[in-house]
Image (cartoon, rainbow, N blue to C red):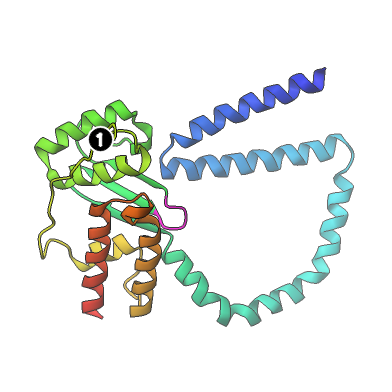
Amino acid sequence: MHRIILLLLILLVLVFFIYRFRRLGSADKKKAMHMILFTLAGAVLVYLVLTGRLNWLVAAVGAILPLLPRLMRFLIGMAPTLLPFLRRYQQNRQSSMQTRFVRLRMNILTGELDGDILEGEFSGKSLQSLSLVELQQLLEKLREQDAESAALLIAYLDRVHPEWSGGESQQHGYTPKDGDMDEQEAREILGVSEAASRDDVIEAHRRLMQKMHPDRGGSDYLAQQINRARDLLLKSL
């Protein structure tokens, strides 16, 4: 009976933390993950000490130590093969677009969107921390103040809250102008560095479109910006 109650309490705590975790911004999520991992490691260590099983951990560490030199030599030998992959993986994890009022971040690996409000009533808050009602209120103001920011917010709503428009088509009403994107913005959109090669740009564009294409839950506006970023960078290479 006591075990059942304990399991229920653990489940309730997990549900609460998952609910809170989903509403955090990207930076806060990283801090929360570090705290969770640190807490779990501490809990495991305390459990091992209290149950007298810490000697098992010491023995396991002692068995692994002699193997470390071989592991290091193996990793050094694999470095020429692994480094290009790791560099590409690192630079193609996150894409971002920024307007006057909104900064949108896109995780290329998961397709998850988040972002921040840069000006106005909700300045400093993450998009995920706002309710659907608050996001719709913000959109109405942006439609009056900055069409580009409104287009970016509509792209977020279409992806994260597909039910927000009640099934009605919502046009962003913004047409990007030639010359209003520079190379730095293009690199941020594709998530590539200044050292990116032509192949890097093409690969980053491919991965991003796999997640953000309108047919896969993205939007026409995001697809337009991603394509423009690719075209601009390829012209400069």
On the picture, is 157 further left or further right than 148? right
| Residue on which disc 1 sits | 123
Q: Locate residue 217, reporting x and y percent.
A: 36, 49
Q: Residue sitting at 75 percent across and 74 percent down?
A: 69
In x, y percent, where is residue 62? Answer: 85, 60
Q: Quadrant of residue 54?
A: top right
Residues rendered magenta in the picture: 107-111
| Quarter occupied by the N terminus | top right
Query: Based on the displayed image, in which of its 4 quarters is residue 210 positioned?
Result: bottom left
| Residue occupying the point 16% across, 37% down | 142
Q: Is residue 147 above or below residue 74?
A: above
Q: Percent from the top left, x then y, of residue 24?
A: 43, 36
| Left or right: where 215 falls relative to 63 | left
Majority secondary structure of magenta residues: loop
Percent from the top left, x then y, of residue 204? 38, 68
Q: Residue at x 32, y 29 (%)?
A: 132
Q: Say which quarter of the image contains residue 101.
A: top left
The answer, for residue 126, to whether it is visible in the render is no
User: Which class describes the residues within 10 Å of circle 1: few (<14), some (14-19), or many (20+)?
Assistant: few
Kindly identify the amino acid type of the residue bearing the numbered disc 1.
Ser
What residue sits 10% from the left and 38% below the top? 145
